[in-house]
Every structure is written in structure tokens, then in C-alpha cells.
Image: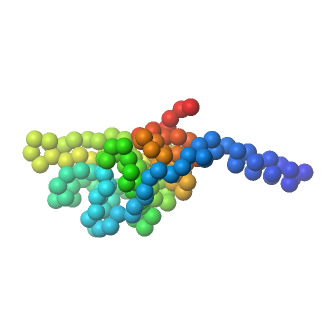
Amino acid sequence: MKIGYIFIILLLLVACKPYDDYKERGHWKQLKENERIGFYWRHNDKIYAALGDSAVLIKYVKPMEDVDIATFYVNKKTTNGMENYAKDKKNVYYPLHAICVDADSYGYEYATELIVKGAFPSSFRYVGDGKGTDGYTMYRYGRREDK
């Protein structure tokens, strides 16, 4: 009887991935030192979610917290080159809000609310048109998309 319940639970878990058939359309790349892809920039083994002059960013922008550098990858293929998904072993990231600071002089932008809530990084893939899925939920531009 226990085997029957376990089988049913496993079957339900496998059958509950409505977006599992979407194919990966992105290319995930690990950032090298001082490399930038979209909003993400690696400097001194820290990841910054910002755009602007490097010296200004180091002075005024805090690096992203709790990012696992060894497993941090950025998706290079997006509709808009600045709105890239990224992921590490703990989270999926997307620049939901960009704040522009002092655009008249040295100006820079930084992203806030980066973590895509509820997304599983181990199975997350970019499927095109600003969309990504972990197999269970579809996200568009970092936000959960309802069916």
C-alpha cells in the first residue's frame, strides 16, 4: 500500500511541470573578472547589477548580496540586451527595477528587486521573448506570468 502512495506522489510531481517541454533558447555564460553582460558586472569577485562607469559603480553601488560566484551565470540571449536573467545555485535573478542616478553628470543605473521569487535555479531556462521557466512556472521579464 505504501508503494502505491509513493508511486502516486511521484507521478503527480512529474506530471505537474506544465512548462517542461519549453526548450532552452539562451546561452548561459559565467562572467570573467571585469566582464559585463547586460546589468551584471563582475569586479573583485563580486557581482554588481548596475550600468555606468566602473569607477563610479565601485564608489556608489553595493555589490549583490549572497551571490555564489562559482555558480553565477548570465543569459546572453535576450530580447533587450540589458534585461538578462542570471542564476546561481540559490536564486534566479532579473533586474526588475532600474534606478537612474544623476543622469546629467556622471550618471549610473543600478537594479533593485533582483531575485525572481519562487523560481528554481537548477531547472531554470530562458525560452525567448523575455520569458523563462523552471518547468513549473512561466516568468516574463522576471515576474510570474499567470496562465
Residue 29 sits in quarter: bottom left
Residue closer to the observer: 15 or 4: 15
At a point 45% along the width and 39% down the height, the residue shown is: 140
Q: Is residue 127 left or right of residue 30?
A: right
Q: Position of residue 60 (x, y in %)?
A: 20, 53
At a point 17% along the width and 55% down the height, the residue shown is: 53
* Residue 106 visible in the current orientation: yes
The C terminus, quarter of image: top right
Residue 69 sits in quarter: bottom left
Residue closer to the observer: 39 or 131: 131
Residue extending farthest right: 1
Residue extending farthest top: 147
Q: Position of residue 27 (x, y in %)?
A: 43, 56
Q: How many marks?
A: 0
* Residue 66 visible in the current orientation: no
At a point 50% along the width and 51% down the height, the residue shown is: 24
Q: In the picture shown, does residue 91 fall above or below 139?
A: below
Display colour scheme = rainbow
Q: Is residue 59 left or right of residue 135?
A: left
Q: Position of residue 20 (x, y in %)?
A: 60, 47
Residue extending farthest left: 105
Q: Position of residue 118 (x, y in %)?
A: 53, 45
Q: Is residue 135 left or right of residue 57?
A: right
Q: Is residue 17 left or right of residue 50?
A: right
At a point 47% along the width and 53% down the height, the residue shown is: 91
